[in-house]
Image (spheres, rainbow, N blue to C red):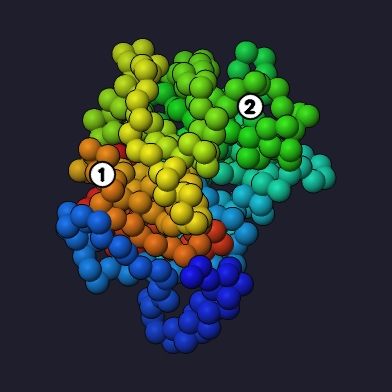
Amino acid sequence: MRLSATYLFLLLQSLFASFSHAQKAYPTLGKITYNDPRLEKLLPKDSKLEVLAMGFVWCEGPVWVKDGGYLLFSDVPKNTVYKWDEKNELSVFLKPSGYTGLGEYSNEPGSNGLMIDKKGRLVSCEHGDRRISAMSLNKGGKITLADHFEGKRFNSPNDIVEHANGSYYFTDPPYGLAGYEKDPSRETPYFGVYQITPKGEVKMIINDLQRPNGLAFSVDGKTLYVSQSDPEKAILMAYPVLADGSVGKGKLFYDATAMSKTGLTGLPDGFKLDIEGNIWTSGPGGILIISPEGKLLGKIETLEIASNCAWGNDGSMLYLTVDGYLCRIKTNTKGANW
């Protein structure tokens, strides 16, 4: 039985109160299911999903700041980026995070995916301002990396990664538009995947996905994985990265469509890889762990919809954004390219 969000919130709130006098102790959530014995090497049977903070509207875009030892994540509807660390726990890091205009914009105006680039800047996918921005973590002040393609504004940039070739790659579904795909302010006919080259040129590299969402590179950087949050085609695709930074013909890597039609909530969204090439992706029921061959190893069942995840600490801690909750789980592996 799926717990209601209200009941789960009240239950965890009471658990937080009971743990308030125990240093570094947090309530736990969900469970782990094992489909393949290989998962036990990644997540031992006694692994626990800890709830670090709660009460948000919709969490997204977690990213670990190595130099500062803290996590940043978006609350998209609240137009806010929060900061969490072990010592001071939760604080507002940036507001507004993705919409700087006047009045109401949409239900999800704020930043979504976040990334720390090789220059140490916070790179944000901004829904409301419909752009990719970069900001120094020390001095503030944003610059725009991209806000249009061929004279047309993006829909609502969603998630972003950086390749060793110096390019950024990001997805542009309609989720941040007030009317989604039917919004009158929509300009581009595509829900594209784009490349920003080291010279700042914007190129559309994929234009045939209905709902591109999360993306990540393989350990060797030769493959770009892209998730699609379409309930009729809930999939992960794999594209070879070519010499010029574009991608070749994609192939199906994993299909979660049948799983999504069993009553489990959630679709493929944000994801990360570990050093062995396993994919840890949000999907129906929580976080799916998929082998490099495309086999489901198991699942972190989160009870509520998981949106994204990120490696942190020494690279072995996996942070999860789960609906209105920030969670984490200790693993026996480490993140790839984290």
The residue drawn where x is 63% and y is 26% is 154
Name the disc covering residue 295, or none: 1
Label 2 belongs to which residue?
154
| Direction from residue 291 to residue 301 in the image, left or right | right
Estimate the x, y position of residue 238 in percent, counting from the top left.
35, 29
The residue drawn where x is 27% and y is 39% is 294
Q: Is residue 64 visible?
A: no
| Direction from residue 58 to residue 198 in the image, left or right | left
The residue drawn where x is 26% and y is 60% is 34
220 vs 277: above or below: above
Dot 2 falls on a residue whose secondary structure is loop
159 vs 249: above or below: below
Give the mark nearest the N terminus, 2 or 1: 2
Dot 1 falls on a residue whose secondary structure is loop
Q: Give the residue type at disc 2.
A: Phe
Q: Nearer the viewer, residue 302 or 199?
A: 302
Crowdedness near tag 1: few (<14), some (14–19) or many (≥20) residues, C-alpha within 10 Å:
some
Q: Give the residue type at disc 1.
A: Lys
